[in-house]
Structure formats: C-alpha cells, structure tokens
Amino acid sequence: AVIDGSIILAIHGARTVGIAVDEVMDVQVIREETVESGASDAQGLVRGLGRLDDGVVVLVDIHALVTQVLL
C-alpha cells in the first residue's frame, strides 16, 4: 500500500527530526550482510546498496542528510 505525504522520524543525537517524503512504498528489514558499502555520492548521502530478493535499494545515510540540513 502506498501512503502519501508521510513523515519519517529519525533520531539525530539528542534530537528527533521529521523528514517529509512524498510517499512511502514499503518498509523492509535489510540484513547487514546484504549491504554493499562503497557506493557513495559527492555529498556522502549514500550509505550503500541493500540487496533484496527482488532487487536493489539505495540506502540513504540519514545522519549525513540531517547534518547537512541542520547546518
């Protein structure tokens, strides 16, 4: 099910922050051993790639994202 206009909550240090997203299509648990590190972008926002049974997802580094926004 697609939920429109969602807020993702993340803990950043002693703060809880909300990140507004257009939609959340799915929530899945990704096992650490299925994560491939080394994928990165110029801003350091990509933590890695997570392998799922039916594909690959890009894992965003929430700490890096929130740090850039709060600066």
Image (cartoon, helix red, strand yellow):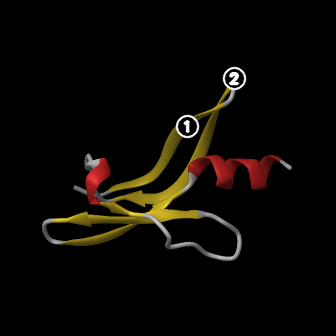
Q: Relative to residue 46, is residue 43 drawn left or right?
A: right
Given the image, on which type of amino acid does mark 1 rest? Ala
Disc 1 element: strand
Query: Which residue does the image show at 69% across and 76% down from the upper left?
Result: 42
Q: Going by the picture, which residue comes out furthest to the right? A: 71
Q: How many marks?
A: 2
Residue identifier under label 1: 10
Where residue 57 sits in the image (x, y, percent)? 34, 68
The residue depicted at 13 percent of the width and 66 percent of the height is 53
Asked which quadrant contains residue 41, the reply is bottom right
The answer, for residue 60, to whether it is visible in the render is yes
Can residue 27 be seen? no
Residue 16 spot, x, y in % from top left: 63, 29
Of 56 and 69, the residue lying toward us: 56
Dividing the picture into quarters, in which one does residue 12 lie?
Answer: top right
* Location of the N terminus (image quadrant): bottom left
Residue 7 lies left or right of residue 26; in this view the side is right
Residue 4 place in picture, x, y as percent:
40, 56
Q: Circle 2 sits on which residue? A: 14
Q: Is residue 64 above or below residue 52?
A: above
Residue positioned 67% across, 53% down in the render: 64
Q: Residue at x 71, y 70 (%)?
A: 43
Residue 62: x percent and y percent?
58, 50
51 is higher (above) or lower (below) than 14: below
